[in-house]
Amino acid sequence: MLNHLIDRIRLLFRKNKESYFRFYRILGFFPHNISYYEQALLHKSLSVKKDNRWVNNERLEFLGDAVLDAVVGDIVYRRFPGKREGFLTNTRSKIVQRETLNRLAVEIGLDKQIKYLSHQSAHNNYMPGNAFEAIVGAIYLDRGYEQCKYFMEHRIIGTYLDLEKISAKEVNFKSKLLEWCQKNHFELDFKLITETHDDLYSPVFESEVYAEKIFLGRGKGYAKKESQQRASEQALGRIKKDADLRAQIVEAKQKREQAEEPQVASTDTEKKEEFVSARETLEEEMPRKNNQKENVISAAEEQAYKGLS
């Protein structure tokens, strides 16, 4: 309490005191090194060059993602003693998933503080959640693990998240993955890799999931659906974190569509060429002696071309 009071007194004499109070309203405490937090809010579209390298919030986002997994895992582990690993993993996943982090960023007003080029906001639904992860990375560098845990446990959980409700909520990862693929017109494929038995001779299934023939995830379960759920959960985690993977899927989709288009064009061209050839043969074998016959043939030709157009 005394240290907090001293920090406030010191801030009154700083030129950039408003920036410190701005972060205090978001975090619930004053930063020591404010530069970490300012970088956490700097989107790559507005990167600045410092010491011969471009600076933005991507590195802090990477660090915050790892710290957030550890912190939330720690909190969930202590909050639910006796619960099995699967329950703890699913509960943590619901908290650190992109939709939840996006909502939390809006709740604490973080979304309004992000610096980015205006056209980026319409194309980046992950921006608030990414900034939230970057802020956690900044807290870790500035104050350490315990402050990260305090921030999540006292500032976020309890205020904006109900762990009991979250833990009881079912998440259909397969449906979420399918929805994402349908929205972006990606081909999705599940493959059953192995079917074995555990020590009690219960069947164990292992499935893999692919988007545009690119491997996304693998999962095991005591039913095919359960293995697909686990594979989908892993896939969604990789898609969320790996921008290169998302780019590979988009590129594979574009190549597939390009490969399909010439086939259709070629087929149409071949049909038209066959028709022209048949027409020329017809003209050679049936001289135009009768105007009525010419009219019938012309009408047939016109109708056929209409069918090809």
Image (tube, helix red, strand yellow):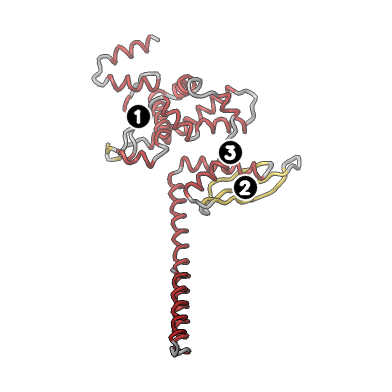
Q: Earlier in the sequence, mark 2 or mark 1?
A: 1
Q: Which mark is residue 112?
A: 1
Where 195 falls versus 265 (above or below)?
above
Q: CA distance from mark 2 to mark 1?
A: 42 Å
Q: CA distance from mark 1 to mark 3?
A: 31 Å
Q: Say few, some or many: other residues with alpha carbon within 10 Å of mark 3 (under 14 / 14 to 19 / 20 or more).
A: few
Q: Would you name the residue on which mark 2 appears?
A: 207
Three-letter residue code for mark 1: Lys
Give residue 139's position: percent from left, percent from top. Answer: 40, 26
Label 2 SS = strand
Three-letter residue code for mark 3: Asn
Give residue 124's position: percent from left, percent from top. Answer: 39, 40
**Quarter of the rendering containing residue 59:** top left
Give residue 121's position: percent from left, percent from top. Answer: 36, 38
Q: Would you name the residue on which mark 3 appears?
A: 172
Label 1 SS = helix
Quadrant that contains the C terminus: bottom left
Q: Residue at x 35, y 28 (%)?
A: 37
**Quarter of the rendering containing residue 61:** top left
Q: Earlier in the sequence, mark 2 or mark 3?
A: 3
